[in-house]
C-alpha cells in the first residue's frame, strides 16, 4: 500500500490521529483506564487474600474441621458444625431451586407465548427479583416460611429462603443457555419427526448443560456466602452438634465467622481468618466444577 493511500485514509472528525499508532488517543486512554482499574482491583484482592491467609495460617490444621466451637478455649475450637451446616443448607438449596429454575427457563423459552400478558408479568418479576437485596428475602423467610408455615429455625427454612434468593439468577442463566442453542437444531429435529419435548430433551438440554451448570453453580456460590438473611432467620452463632436432617437447627460458616470476628480476643481473629480460608476453598472448588463442566460439555456451532 502506498503512502498516498495511507494519507487519504478516513479520519474521524474531532479525533486527532497519532502518527505510528493504530488507535485514536481517546481509545488508548480508555484502554489504559480499564487496565488501571483491573490492576487496582487485583492488587486489593491479592492483598486481602494474603492478609487472611497470614492471619489464619496458625489455625489451618485439622482442628478447624474436626472440632466444634468453644467459647472458653479458642485454641481447641473448630468449625465442624458450621462446615456441616453449610453443606446441608447448600445441598437442599440446590435440590429446591435448580429443578424449579431450569424447568421455568424451559417453559419461558420453549413453550410460553411472549405476547400473553401473564408471561410478560412473570418475566418482569423474575428480572426485578434478581435485584432485590438479600435482607428482604430474610424478612420474607422469617415471616412466611419460619413463622407462617411453622418450620422454625431449621435447615429447611434456611434452604427455602436461599432458594428464593438465587432462583431468579438460576432462571436467567438457564434461559440464556437455552436461548444460545441455534434454532436450526430445533428445526432439524422437528423436521425428522421428533416431538417438541423430544427435541428439548435430546437436543436442546444437552447443548445447554454447560451454561446451565455454570450459572447454577455461580448462583449457589452466592448463596453459600450469605449471612444477612440467615442471621435474620435466627441462625445460631454457637452450635456444638451437626445437623441430622432438615428439621435440625443449624449454623453456617458466614454466621460462625461473624461470631468469631465480634469476639475481643486475638485467638478468635485467627479462627475467623482460617474459617474464611475454608469458605474460599469451598467456593473455589464449586467454581472449578463449573469451569470443568463448561469446558467438558461446551459445543461450538
Image (tube, rainbow, N blue to C red):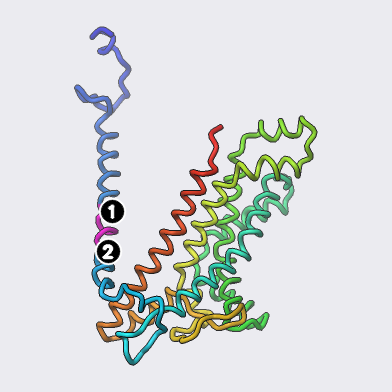
Residue 259, horizontal then vertical, whole percent: 38, 82
Q: Nearer the viewer, residue 112 or 74?
A: 74
Nearest to N terminus: mark 1 or mark 2: 1
In the picture as drawn, the residue positioned furthest to the left comes out as 19
Question: In the image, residue 29 lies at what x, y percent?
Answer: 25, 38
- Tell me if residue 7 comes above or below residue 155 in the rendering: above
Q: Looking at the figure, which quarter contains the N terminus?
A: top left
Instruction: Decide whether residue 6 is among the magenta residues.
Output: no
Is 47 magenta? The answer is yes
**Figure quadrant of the C terminus:** top right
12 or 230: which is nearer to us? 230
Q: Position of residue 190 (x, y in %)?
A: 76, 34
* Numbered tag placed on residue 48 in the rendering: 2
User: What secondary structure is marked by label 1?
Assistant: helix
The secondary structure that most of the magenta stretch takes on is helix
In percent of width and height, residue 295 lies at 49, 43
Left or right? Give the position of 264 relative to 238. left
Q: In this rendering, is residue 212 above or below 240?
A: above
Residue appearing at x 45%, y 55% in the figure? 287
Residue interval drawn in magenta: 40-49
x 46%, y 87%: residue: 240
Identify the residue position indicated by label 1 in the image. Answer: 42
- For the residues labelled 1 and 2, the Cα–Cα distance comes to 10 Å
Amino acid at each position: 500500500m502506498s503512502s498516498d493511500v495511507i494519507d487519504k485514509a478516513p479520519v474521524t472528525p474531532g479525533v486527532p490521529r497519532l502518527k505510528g499508532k493504530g488507535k485514536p488517543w481517546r481509545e488508548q486512554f480508555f484502554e489504559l483506564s480499564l487496565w488501571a482499574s483491573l490492576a487496582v482491583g487485583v492488587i486489593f484482592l491479592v492483598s486481602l487474600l494474603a492478609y487472611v491467609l497470614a492471619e489464619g495460617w496458625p489455625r489451618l490444621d485439622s482442628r478447624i474441621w474436626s472440632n466444634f466451637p468453644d467459647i472458653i478455649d479458642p485454641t481447641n475450637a473448630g468449625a465442624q458444625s458450621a462446615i456441616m451446616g453449610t453443606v446441608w443448607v447448600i445441598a437442599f438449596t440446590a435440590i429446591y431451586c435448580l429443578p424449579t429454575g431450569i424447568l421455568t427457563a424451559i417453559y419461558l423459552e420453549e413453550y410460553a407465548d411472549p405476547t400473553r400478558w401473564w408471561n410478560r408479568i412473570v418475566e418482569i418479576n423474575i428480572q426485578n427479583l434478581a435485584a432485590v437485596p438479600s435482607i428482604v428475602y430474610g424478612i420474607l423467610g422469617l415471616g412466611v416460611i419460619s413463622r407462617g408455615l411453622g418450620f422454625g429455625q431449621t435447615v429447611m427454612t434456611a434452604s427455602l429462603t436461599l432458594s428464593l434468593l438465587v432462583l431468579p439468577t438460576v432462571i436467567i442463566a438457564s434461559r440464556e443457555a437455552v436461548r444460545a442453542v441455534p434454532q436450526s437444531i430445533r428445526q432439524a429435529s422437528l423436521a425428522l419427526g421428533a416431538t417438541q419435548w423430544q427435541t428439548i430433551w435430546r437436543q436442546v438440554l444437552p447443548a445447554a448443560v454447560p451454561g446451565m451448570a455454570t450459572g447454577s453453580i455461580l448462583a449457589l456460590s452466592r448463596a453459600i456466602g450469605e449471612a444477612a438473611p440467615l442471621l435474620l432467620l435466627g441462625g445460631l452463632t454457637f452450635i456444638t452438634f451437626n445437623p441430622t436432617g432438615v428439621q435440625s437447627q443449624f449454623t453456617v460458616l458466614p454466621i460462625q465467622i461473624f461470631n468469631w470476628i465480634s469476639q475481643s480476643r486475638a485467638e478468635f481473629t485467627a479462627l475467623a481468618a482460617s474459617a474464611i480460608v475454608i469458605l474460599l476453598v469451598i467456593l473455589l472448588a464449586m467454581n472449578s466444577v463449573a469451569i470443568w463442566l463448561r469446558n467438558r460439555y461446551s459445543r461450538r456451532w
